[in-house]
Image (tube, coloured by chain):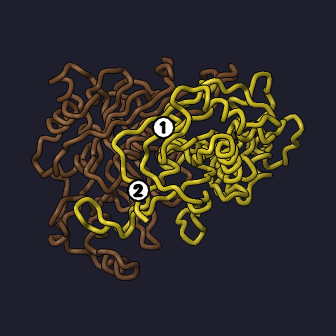
Chain colours: A yellow, B brown
Amino acid sequence: MPSVAEPAHLEVIALEGIPEIKPGDDLAEIVLDALRATPNALPARDDDVLVVTQKVVSKAEGAIADLTTVEPRPEAVAFAKRWDRDARQVELVLRHAKRVVRMDNGVVITETAHGFVCANGGIDASNVGPDSGSIVTLLPADPDASAARIRAVVREATGIDVPVIVSDSFGRPWRFGIVDVAIGVSGLVPLDDLRGTPDHDGRVMKSTVRAVADELASAAELTLGKHSARPVAVVRGAAFRRGEGSIKEVLMPASWDLFR
Amino acid sequence: MPSVAEPAHLEVIALEGIPEIKPGDDLAEIVLDALRATPNALPARDDDVLVVTQKVVSKAEGAIADLTTVEPRPEAVAFAKRWDRDARQVELVLRHAKRVVRMDNGVVITETAHGFVCANGGIDASNVGPDSGSIVTLLPADPDASAARIRAVVREATGIDVPVIVSDSFGRPWRFGIVDVAIGVSGLVPLDDLRGTPDHDGRVMKSTVRAVADELASAAELTLGKHSARPVAVVRGAAFRRGEGSIKEVLMPASWDLFR
């Protein structure tokens, strides 16, 4: 199946009016209201995608923890002391890890139950709400399902079937800084596999698999930023493929991975 | 210094009318013509960025090689045979490597002379022009300087000082697929360091350094794609900081890197 014809113009529209999200809030309904309230945001094209950041998904789903209730193991206490970290947060990272990939330099890199390899298991303290000094967010239990729920509510209410990405900020080896990537998808194929198709010179491409869901997440981040209370954006006009994809397609099995 | 106020809307405009680039072409002048020819593309705002893909930069600068002139060493021949690769390309990757990071599963990951850690040393065969079966592109010798030259020509001709990013497609550990990242910058700070600034709840963020140049490169890729002959885009409205940055700021020194 060919990619969607590549348009020459892309837009990212941050949704307006999304309030502080609390556990139990109906995030899909809130996103729907914001889609309707933000000028030109309501999806109307086949190449619209909705990007929702992890923090609001985790908060709405109650995927949070209170550090004051966490009793760190001795290993977490020692690591935290050596690197000036919060031992209770280190404990939570270890508790939610399927495997510790590296633990050095103040950084704990784990493989989460979902199969994501990331720093601190995706557990994060910033932007979790006012007066929330001891509250951290965990990753959603099933981010593909989180994306599917939002997609279903939007479709039910509007008749519009818009693909949804749940995004989070991950660091990378070898390069400083974090970039937003997809941790859950619904309604799009996260990898656009161009292998076997001709490039514009007619030469068959051997190894081009575009990680479009990750690039869509990064594009959204450029308008959502970190300071603002803007957790959701519509990306319009990107070259990607609709379909029933899963973020699992992006995760490299151990047999492929040169860095385990 | 605070970040540029974060706007709620971002656009990516792919430039039109850029011809096949050949060694010796004046890429900066060609980009300037395309900026003038594409509706609304000419930078007019402080938050405009020009993203130019590596392939055209390398071709214009003559950073290419003809595989028919390459004599592979026995190690390259053995690796290529085992994994169905082109021994001459493996040889070129090894020749341009400062260090081999991993070499397995058909993948050669090296650290280039610039300090980039990437698959195949950034050496690439697709989209190098018609009738170019044996020609591959190498990375530009100094991508920051490549970006600076384009920026200077645009500024000289128009009075507009637009930051420039040279981008390339890199794979990542643990996740399938490639994403575009920055390999050279001029006129912007590639890392937006929010550490010490308050998030929107007033909590001081401890570890948020946004890799904005990489995200800008990814956003541009969503309109440039891989099939098309569109190698340059303007990104308008992203949250980033202008300044005299270098891609070297993004590259992690060995002492920080848990994966050497």
Circle 1 is placed at which residue position? B211
Side (left or right) of A4 relative to A164: left
Q: Is residue B86 above or below residue B142?
A: below
Q: Chain of mark 2?
A: B
Side (left or right) of A228 relative to B15: right
What is the spatial separation of the Cα atoms under label 2 and label 1, in whole angstroms?
A: 17 Å
Q: Is residue A117 visible?
A: yes
Q: Residue A94 placed where, x, y %?
A: 76, 51
- From this viewpoint, which residue is outermost toward the front? A159
The quarter of the rendered structure image containing the N terminus of chain A is: bottom left
Q: Is residue B171 above or below residue A91?
A: below
Answer with mark 2 or mark 1, whichever residue precedes in sequence.
2
Local SS, label 1: loop
Local SS, label 2: strand
Side (left or right) of B41 relative to A193: left
Q: Is residue B260 visible?
A: no
| Residue drawn at point x = 47 percent, y = 73 percent | B105
| Residue drawn at point x = 88 percent, y = 43 percent | A71
**Few, some or many C-alpha atoms within 10 Å of disc 1 (few <14, some 14-19, many ≥20)?**
many
| Residue drawn at point x = 31 percent, y = 51 percent | B113
Q: Residue A179 placed where, x, y %?
A: 52, 41
| Residue drawn at point x = 39 percent, y = 62 percent | A208
- From this viewpoint, which residue is outermost toward the left? B24
Q: Amino acid at mark 2?
A: Cys
Q: Nearer the viewer, residue B53 or B99?
A: B53
Circle 2 is placed at which residue position? B118
Q: Is residue A11 above or below residue A245?
A: above
Q: Residue A228 placed where, x, y %?
A: 60, 24
